[in-house]
Image (spheres, grey):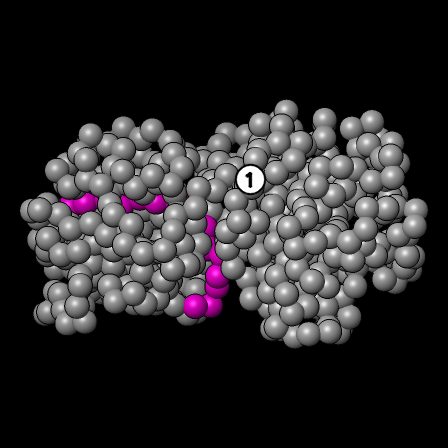
Amino acid sequence: MASTQLHKTFSGAGNRKTFTLSFWVKRTKLSTGMYVFNVGNQEANPQAGLEFQGNDTLTFWNDSGSGSKIMTTTQVFTDANAWYHLVFSIDTTQSTASDRVKIYVNGEQITSFSTATYPDQNYDYEWNGTQRHTIGAYYNNQSYFDGLLSHIHFVDGTAYPASTFGSTDSVTGEWSINTSPSITMGTNGFTILKDGNTITDQSANSNNFTLAGGTLTNTEDCPSNVFATFNNLIPQTGATFNKGNTACYRTTSGTYKRIGCTIGATSGKYYAEFLLGASQWGGICLTNGGDIERTTLGNNGYMGEYAADKSVGIRHDGIVYSSGANVSSAQWNQGSLGTTDKLCLALDMDNKKLFLGKNGTWNVSSNPATNTGGISLTGDSYTFCGATSNADCKINTGNGYFGTDAISSEGTNASGIGKFEYDVPTGFTALSTKGLNE
């Protein structure tokens, strides 16, 4: 949503003392101030907002002109792979100040704040009033939210706890989404972005939002299935991550840095596709104690260039390296990869092999479905990886996009997990939380 904003102005004010806001959020850009929600359409008060600060804390604030009511967490939100479930349960009719604002993260109520200015009893928030409500930006087209949002519920007139919208999985112990919560919406209540990217209210209220700028992309990545994306927590000087961390651009020419993904695997079979800019590399690398960490400190990030380097990489011109050896003649006979050609990778951790393909055709009579051919691997844990220098490297691990470029036609995928340009080999799936459990 990096330049996207949604607008809604209610025809009449709802209950400004008691309401609930519940949503799931995945951050893809850190250490930058950005608004998730804003109420108001001018710099002067009254206004309200919900924003991630530049130090990655979260602030929920309201200013009606007689002093600001601000709640800022001490907790930071720096996991770029995670979906966070946030619930703001507001009831200013309560006699105890700390009961008037309850903020939950993944089912746990936050009790530690760097700033905690609770509202007075029976205080009226600007939320749920007749000012413009904006999702994804500050009122004046600034401080855009960069990330993913899902299952946004706003309830007019009831303060619900987090347990209404989620529960702890009895097997994994993780907080899981309740996709159909039992809630009384109230007049101004709404549910959007529940299934896909629709901003049509999916409650019975018809409180639809409008797209006021940018575009909304429907991703497969969601609270119940997290897909691997480029990991922006690994420091990369000059690297810019965008498009939900499915694209990386590094401004420094001639020095390559490897960008690994957020999820790795020690077993199973996984498929991904790359769209490489000039001189860019696609491939796989170790996920811990290996060359991702090593190459962030050096200048050269060619993949598979050293004998001790257990990664495998292919450059856009068809040069293939594996553990220090140039294996192009043995493992690649399809020439260079043009700006519209798709690199296909099949990572088989059960048989310790990587298979290379171009535009859906596997190389040198190899066949990942039958374990025929392929490049042998010696590492224990791998992830998909790109190496970039002065151009874009884009990856599709199942979201159906290379950056903002949608797949032109969807290939077959027996696992049903993820969307790809070409057919996923039999027995392979997307590198995602569901894919890991296949």
Q: Is residue 300 left or right of residue 89?
A: right
Instruction: State which quadrant residue 236 falls in.
Output: bottom right
Q: Which contiguous range is marked in magenta?
A: 17-32
Depth order, front residue of 278/7: 278
The image quadrant where one finds the C terminus is: top right
Depth order, front residue of 129/250: 250
Depth order, front residue of 394/235: 394
Q: Is residue 395 visible?
A: yes
**Which residue is painted at 24% across and 32% down in the image?**
203
Local packing at callout 1 (Cα closer than 10 Å; few below 14, some 14-19, many 20+) is few
Q: What is the three-letter code of the residue carrying label 1?
A: Ser
Q: Position of residue 400 (x, y in %)?
A: 55, 41
Q: How many marks?
A: 1
**Residue behind mark 1:** 408
Instruction: State which quadrant residue 390 falls in.
Output: bottom right
The image quadrant where one finds the N terminus is: bottom left
Q: Position of residue 250 (x, y in %)?
A: 62, 68
**Which residue is painted at 55% across and 30% down in the image?**
171
Question: Which SS does the magenta portion mostly show?
Answer: strand
Q: Position of residue 100 (x, y in %)?
A: 19, 52
Q: Is 23 covered by the magenta stretch?
A: yes
Q: Is residue 100 left or right of residue 88?
A: left
Q: Is residue 364 left or right of residue 408?
A: right
Q: Is residue 347 visible?
A: no
Q: Position of residue 364 (x, y in %)?
A: 87, 39
Q: Is residue 378 left or right of residue 161?
A: right
Does 118 appear above or below 330? below
**Which residue is painted at 35% across and 36% down in the image?**
194
